[in-house]
Image: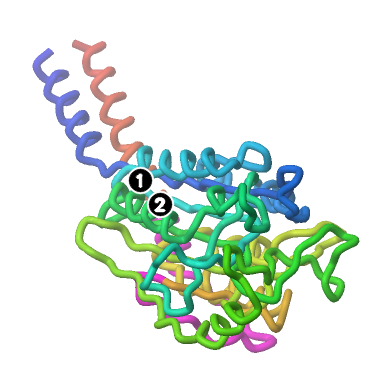
Amino acid sequence: MMRKAFILGVLSSLLVCFPSFAEKKAYLVCIGEYAEGTEWGRISADNDLSLLTKTLSDEFSVTAISNSNATYLNVVSFLNNIAENASPGDTVLIHFSCHGQQMLTLNDKTEPDGLDEAIITYDANKYYSPSYHGEHHLRDDEINVIFDRIRLSLGDNGLLFVLFDACHSDTLHKGNAAGKVNGQILRGTGEVFGSETTKEVIDSLRKIKYAQDPFHVNKDSGVCDVVYVSACQASSKNAETEVNHVGYGSLSYAFVQAYNSEGGIHRENLSDLLSSIRDNMSLIHPYQTPVFHSSLSIVLRDNPKSGDTPVPHAHVMRKTLIGLLFLFVLLIIAACIARTIRKNRID
């Protein structure tokens, strides 16, 4: 009996000491239809939701909020719940497929161009009015506060990966199939939201819109690294794409293609993953360039040459080796248990 207790104690110690695997969680905010009276056109976010859920489910636990459920209050609650449920070391992916709009700032002197960017929730109106002052626009400042909480929850070893398949730039208009611009569905509007959006004000803002400093993401102690991916530059259009007569957000589709070709999301493959997103976007819309910001040192690879043979990625071999090691340990544990049982029967 003492021998059995000793062996079980050793096995228990092995199981406790064996490193636990951090979780991977994906959170999707996809709004294809907007509340009546908001004057926002329909986009293909429902297709993005289906495509992303199917793609990510093998690696991530996926939670989504969409359409009428994605009101301002619900989206804010949805994002706050991510911070509350995140654990140190987790990888969290957050994806937005919706409209985007620029707004006049609320006395914010940190914006050189005088504009905030906003995610358009289900119940956010397109135009300023005496009864609506932008209360349901989810401004970038508010989003960043929540992201800071998420990064703190994920700790030093976690990773936050965020994609914005929404437009935050000017000269954009969005509608249904009957309201395409130059034959394309665009996710945004050139209408700047605010109470003083006269031609003189907008012209003045546009003159200094390029005065913004490069955006650097800090990595302080106790918070995770982060990668932000935007569908287009501030001055570019974010157009949807169509594959086999099905519409998708261009970034959503480019990301899925990159995700599949690069083997998911891992710290070791982020440079290759972002490079693939860039390359896929250049094929979908050559004029549209995605924008990447990160606390990590991301070095994009050179544009691929035709005929190049793909090189196996290091993270694939690493993942395979970890799996084999885990299986080997389980086999040892099983053999020890079987041996103990046989000895007890003999005794």
Is 272 left, or right, of 286 in this rendering? left
Query: Where 223 falls versus 35 (above or below)?
Result: below
Marks 1/2: CA distance?
Answer: 7 Å
Which one is in front, 310 or 219?
219
Give the residue type at disc 1.
Ala
Q: Nearer the viewer, residue 224 or 108?
A: 108
Task: Give the labeled residue for mark 1.
Answer: 22
Q: Residue at x 44, y 72 (%)?
A: 293
Q: Position of residue 102 (x, y in %)?
A: 57, 67
**Residue 186 image point, x, y percent:** 74, 67
Quadrant location of the N terminus in the rendered image: top left
Q: Nearer the viewer, mark 1 or mark 2?
A: 2
Q: Is residue 95 above or below residue 234?
A: above
In the rendered image, the residue lying farthest to the front is 130
State left or right for residue 208 relative to residue 261: left
Magenta span of residues = 294-322
Closest to the observer: 84 or 107?
A: 107
> Is residue 308 depicted above or below 281 in this figure?
below
The residue labelled by disc 2 is 91
Q: Residue at coordinates 18% horizontally, 11% vertically from top-left?
A: 347
Q: Residue at the location (20% across, 61% down)?
A: 221
Quadrant housing residue 335: top left
Q: Secondary structure at mark 2?
A: strand
Residue 17 lies, with reference to residue 248, above or below; the image says: above
Which amino acid type is shown beneath numbered disc 2? Thr
Look at the numbered discs 1 and 2 and tell me whether their residues touch, using CB distance below 8 Å.
yes
